[in-house]
Amino acid sequence: MNDTQSGIEGQLKFLTEKIELLQETVADLSARLQTLEKGEPLREKQQTAQAAKPLQQAKNIDPQPGVLKKAGTGALLPRVAAVCFALVVALILRTITDNGIINIQLGSMLGLGYAAALIIGGWWLYSRLSRLALVFPACGLLLLFSVVLESHGRFESLSAVMAYIILFIGGAAVTALGLRYRASGQLCLAGLGSGLVGMSIDFPYPFYPLLALLLFGGAVAAYIANRQKLCPSLRYTTLGLIIVFWMFWAFKLNVPAACDEPTAAILHLNWFYPLLLVFWLFFAVANIHRMATDTEDLGFFESFLPTVAGVGAFLAAWSVTVPWYRSTLLLGIVGVLAAILHFVVGGWLAARNKEGAIGSTTYTFAGIVLLSLGVAAVFSNLLWSVPILSVSAYMLVRVANRWQSGGIRCISYLFQLAAGVVAAATGVVAADFANPLVGCLIIGILMTMSFLQYRWCRSHSPPFTHSAFFSWLDRKDFSAVILLLTGLISGFFLLRLGLYQVLASTTADFEYMFRGGQTVFINLGAVFLLLVASSRKNTEILTVAIIVGLIGMLKSFVFDLFGIKGMPLVYSVFSSGVVAAVGSVVSSRWQRKKERIKPENNAVPAESLDSEVATPHH
């Protein structure tokens, strides 16, 4: 009985211990569950586990990326190795071809095939995002250039037509790769390299139509790349190559040994004008499309492209038309129509961009240059561009005020100055001009337009918006003095031309009278300017009058005094004395007016002070 009771007590004690252990386990599990539901990490457990790790394991940390790591596990050494292995295969093909193991034709085909395989491999690697993708298309294209040049130039196993076709296909493939995977380096290599290699084929007598097609493809690729914000410098390089190409072709056509049918066939004259028109239309349409679709401001490339493309194409066509066709009438009509087209585009841009007429300046500038050149080509004389430039300058300055475009106003100054320079270069300002009536008409138009433009500019301040010139460099519009000087100089030459015609038929003492008369004209101009400056209180005109008077006195007392004699010398010295006398009177009156203005300015504060004291403030 006692044994049975002791056995039951032992079992109860064992069960009690088990229940207590289960209670502790349940409490521990409940606490862990609550901690996990709150999102708190078990820091104590983790810290205990980390403390239990050996010290040697804690020191097993990845090293920092250094030069060796970057070179070995990065892209440098793998790419160098890929270039070396690709070059080894190319050298093997070259060696077995040079040693006669295979013929040159087969060697060239194998080289081209290997280059194509490298380009195709580059496409596959770019699609796999491999770090070696950059190497294969570049190496393949460079190998293609080398094989084409040697096969055509050295071994003559490849015709010029096939060489250009292969260059076009290879360049197009790499260009498409660069556009698809946004690889700027591949685009630059394909666009610039294909053009340079194409120009070197059969130099200095390349196959001009196919070379033009190759360069045109580069221009299209550069435009597409720029639209995708890739390799913006490619536009400048391709445009530079195109300009060099057209200059070279026009030069070859401009100075031929004989302008006959065989020479025209060799230089591909029949292709010159159509291809030139295609290039001009592409650049014009591309630039207009960019302005119509983009909201960004014009860059430097878009600003000068209309003038470079339009005027450059016209000058190239003019240089070829003169030796081959003599008459430039049709070319002049085309130039006038192109100028009208530029004016229409400029007006559309001004209407589209009300504030500042962004983009209209570039097309207006190109249009006026084309109009002046077109009129000159119609009459086969650059002389007739002078009135076009002069009248256009005056119209431009009024248009600039309407469009609130400071750039167009600045261009109007340059056109008036250019009209004077062209007049001097064509010889219309010469006293013995062959047609004095035409000379008087042209110089008279130049003088009138210059004075009218100067007077208008002095009554209308320039717009400062969208014009770095007037808002930063010339806020007070000092550059308008160019117009006054152009008018004065053209007026002097107009009087000089008339004096020459009168003296040539009326006097025997022609040389002395002509030289003395020019001095009198200069001094009379100084007197006129002094009187105008005094009446208008204009310091700018006074400064110009002083300069003109000094020039007249210098001519009178240095050149005339020791170069002429008789009454012409008397007239010359007397006119200088008149300038000095009028200048003295004007100076004294100017000084008295300044002294009279100063006391009035000093009296104004006193009067205002008295009025303020007498009148109380409310």
Image (cartoon, rainbow, N blue to C red):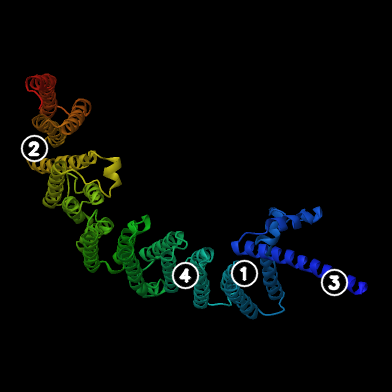
Whichever of callouts 3 and 2 sits on the residue coming sooner in the sequence is 3
Q: Which of marks 4 and 2 is in front?
A: 4
Q: Disc 1 designates what residue? A: 130
Can I make out residue 424 in this image? no
Q: Distance between the residues labelled 3 and 4?
A: 113 Å
Q: Disc 3 designates what residue? A: 11
Q: In the picture, residue 15 is in which quadrant?
A: bottom right
Q: In the picture, residue 82 is in which quadrant?
A: bottom right
Q: Nearer the viewer, residue 18 or 595?
A: 18
Q: Nearer the viewer, residue 167 or 443?
A: 167
Quadrant (top left/top right/bottom left/bottom right) for the C terminus = top left
The amino acid pointed to by label 2 is: Thr
The amino acid pointed to by label 3 is: Gln
Whichever of callouts 3 and 4 sits on the residue coming sooner in the sequence is 3
Q: How far apart are marks 4 and 2 (CA)?
A: 63 Å
The amino acid pointed to by label 1 is: Ser
Q: Distance between the residues labelled 1 and 4?
A: 39 Å
- On screen, 420 above or below 612? below
